[in-house]
Image: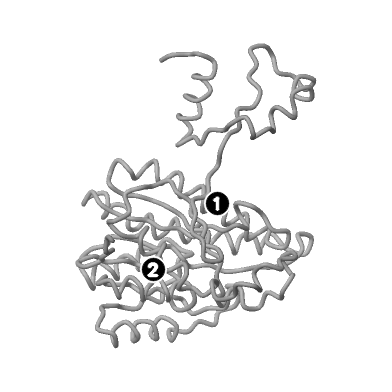
Amino acid sequence: MTSVSFTGQVVAITGAGGGLGRAFALEVARRGGSVVVNDLGGSVTGAGDETSIAFADRVVEEIRAAGGRAVASYDSVATPQGGQAIIQAALDSFGQIDAVIANAGNMRLGEFEDLSFDDLQALLAVHVGGSWNVAKAAWPHMKARGYGRMVFMTSSGGMLGTGKLTAYGAAKGGVMGLMHGLSEAGALHGILCNAIMPNAASRMTMDIAPGELGENPWSAQMPQYFAPQFTAGLAAFLASSACQTWHGVYSALGGRVARMFIAAANGYLGDDTIDADVIAAHWDEIRDDTRGYAIPANITDEFRIVAEMKGIEV
């Protein structure tokens, strides 16, 4: 079995003061990596001005007590300056940056009519803006060295949807779009980007009442699998040199790790104008996924797939 190692590597992990982020930091450090433990120490919603350096400091102390190397960062991912400061902490303390795990997040839960535009903006600033800011800061250093790993946190709330997480889902869907774009931009420079859909008990989920996100009688039957440690191995692998794939979204749920993907069914292939009446007549065919499907690698690949269906050779 291949041993995943971070010896000689430096990883910046945002939102690493507890829950998933802490588990990621401990796992990377255990495998020899130097870690920047970033955590603003704010509330789960991100509202208010109260912050605490204790969250990041505690994880740094844990890592150092076990013989590892770590420094704390208390900067906010929600600003470009904060993103730059997090990566600069890696450069100043350890001389390089090899991987980023963009885990920082906040939560706003409620019925759509009760959520405000400010709620949406707050989530976009941390999830999408925060992922953008740390990636933007690390990018030139990784590009210059021809190596890097970016791991983003998306969500089933963004990919599959949940009624009371519309704003959160919109932000997490944005993270998925960012990952796909950066995958295309980075692969030629050795920067491989992937995303995780984690399902774990954390500070962000502990106040959600059973059934508040819909009836789910299954999760109560396997609570042990929602410990953050069940996602830590996936995050560590994707952030390591052992990972040689990109453009992937991986679900960690209930003790199962699996690739999630967007596919196009074979659908209806028309040569004339496809008006609404034609759509109506072929709606079942358009929706039918039992006759096969394709998984486009990118925008260009979808063009190729349709062209081949039409017998067009390039």
Q: Which residue, as the protein is rendered here, is positioned at the far top?
A: 272
Residue type, label 1: Gly
Q: Are marks 1 and 2 in contact (CB under 8 Å)?
A: no
Q: From the top left corner, tell me how far across and down residue 129 is, in percent.
A: 49, 58
Could you tell me which residue is drawn at 40 percent across and 73 percent down? 38
Q: Nearer the viewer, residue 46 or 298?
A: 298
Q: Quadrant of residue 157?
A: bottom right
Q: Quadrant of residue 238?
A: bottom left
SS at badge 2: strand
Q: From the top left corner, tell me how far across and down residue 269 is, in percent.
A: 63, 19
Q: From the top left corner, tell me how far across and down residue 74 is, in percent.
A: 41, 77
Could you tell me which residue is drawn at 69 percent across and 58 percent down? 162
Q: Residues within 10 Å of mark 2 (few under 14, many from 20)?
A: many
Q: Nearer the viewer, residue 251 or 247?
A: 251
Which of the numbered marks, if any, corresponds to residue 49? none
In the rendered image, which quarter contains the C terminus? top left
Q: Nearer the viewer, residue 287 or 63?
A: 287
Residue type, label 2: Ile
Residue on which the image places disc 2: 13
Q: From the top left corner, tell me how far across and down residue 276 is, in percent.
A: 77, 22
C-alpha distance separating marks 1 and 2: 19 Å
In the rendered image, which quarter contains the N terminus? bottom left
Q: Colour scheme in the image?
A: one colour
For marks 1 and 2, the one nearer the N-term is: 2
Residue on which the image places disc 1: 174
SS at badge 1: helix
Side of 219 where 71 appears, left or right: left
Q: Which residue, as the protein is rendered here, is positioned at the far front?
A: 1
Could you tell me which residue is drawn at 64 percent across and 27 percent down? 267
